[in-house]
Amino acid sequence: MYAKCGNIEDAYQLFKQMDANNIALWNAMLVGLAQHGNGEEALKLFKVMKTHGIAPDRVTFIGVLSACSHSGLVSEAYEYFHSMHEKYGIEPEIEHYACLVDALGRAGRTQQAEELIATMPFEASASMYRALLGACRVQGNTETGKRLAERLLALDPSDSAAYVLLSNIYAAANQWDDVTDARSTMKRKYVKKDPGFSWIDVKNTLHLFVVDDKSHPQADLIYDKVEDLMKRIKEEGYIPDTDFVLLDVEEEEKERALYYHSEKLAIAYGLISTPPSTTLRIIKNLRVCGDCHNAIKYISKVSEREIVLRDANRFHHFRDGICSCGDYW
């Protein structure tokens, strides 16, 4: 519960106080550390677990492989993957293959990931292709992205993620006609994109924001705070990454379109409505975009706050201008 609510420190303290001979406790801690980007700590814990004579199970290896994936430890991921059967007699399941595919994709080894998918004894899941498509977006790999999107849409023609990620890839490559075509196909097939939103709990009240949201009672103060933050972080060296704007408009308009993403609005509200030492905990239903991730690093520095953001993939802990993911997500 502590780990899933963004407080990995208290989760670890509680774990250490317990008589942890139950595999479920170790698995919960391992998976929690992996989700928070503490990959090397998770792998150390796995070694400690073995010294206690506790045999790992299939869930343990999901935590271990996730830890490798979130920390860029590809060779280690392969070692642990092969050890499942060789050392422990555990046959890898599709979830374990998915972790390995994810590790390869995050490391930019999309071709190797595709080869793994082709040779594994399971049909590839939509989530595998989505993970690789996301990796193609980060790496600007347009051709592989198009191929993977076709495979994903063959599995599920109504998967909005395929169209959205493909649009993102085209937009980053300034292929605006292709962006328009992808969006038109979505409309023609009545495929709706999941709306992005972020929320923050302040004094036991949930405050939810969408992009350009002006519905909050304190919208004016929130927007003033965002403007102030953007000014301050630019002075610190922040440069808006307009590749994340899916509009063929002037650069200045693109910058302003980035200002009011839902997570920035949630953070601005948190800053104006909580005491200076409070850790802000934000949840977003989609993956945080690269520009927001960069901006939040700067915001954590200028505001002298710790900001914990849970997106669709993992937890990000921002403190003093640095994120726990090491910009690897």
Image: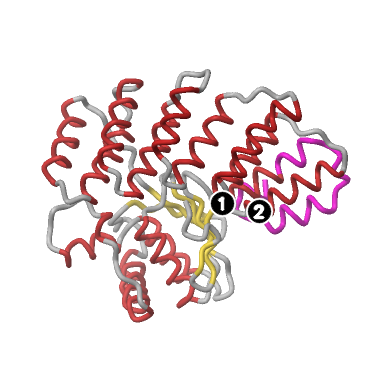
Residue kind at label 1, given as amino acid type: Ser
Q: Is residue 323 left or right of residue 108?
A: right
In the image, what residue occupies the spot 33% across and 64% down? 219
Q: Are marks 2 and 1 in contact (CB under 8 Å)?
A: yes
SS at badge 2: helix
In-image side of 243 versus 107 (left or right) = left
The spot of residue 109 in percent (x, y) is 43, 42
Image quadrant in which you'd find residue 90 = top right
Residue 311 rendering spot, x and y as whole percentages: 47, 49
Percent across and percent down for residue 76 are 62, 44
Q: Quadrant of the N terminus?
A: top right
Look at 30% across and 25% down and name the residue there: 153
- Residue 141 falls inside the magenta stretch: no
In this view, the residue in front, 41 or 105, is: 105
Q: Is 13 colored magenta in this rendering? A: yes
Mark 2 or mark 1: name the one nearer the start of the chain.
2
Give the label on residue 40, or none: 2
The residue located at (74%, 44%) in the rendering is: 46
Q: Is residue 279 above or below residue 67?
A: below
Element class at badge 1 = helix
Task: Give, as a single range, the part of the protein colored magenta.
Answer: 1-28
Residue 182 x, y percent position in the rendering: 19, 35
| Image position of 285 with respect to 254: above or below | above
Q: Nearer the viewer, residue 234 or 266?
A: 234
In the picture, measured across the screen, residue 11 lies left or right of residue 303, that is right
Please, what is the three-letter code of the amino acid marked with disc 2? Answer: Glu
**Mark-to-mark CA distance, 2 and 1:** 7 Å
Q: Which residue is mark 1?
A: 71
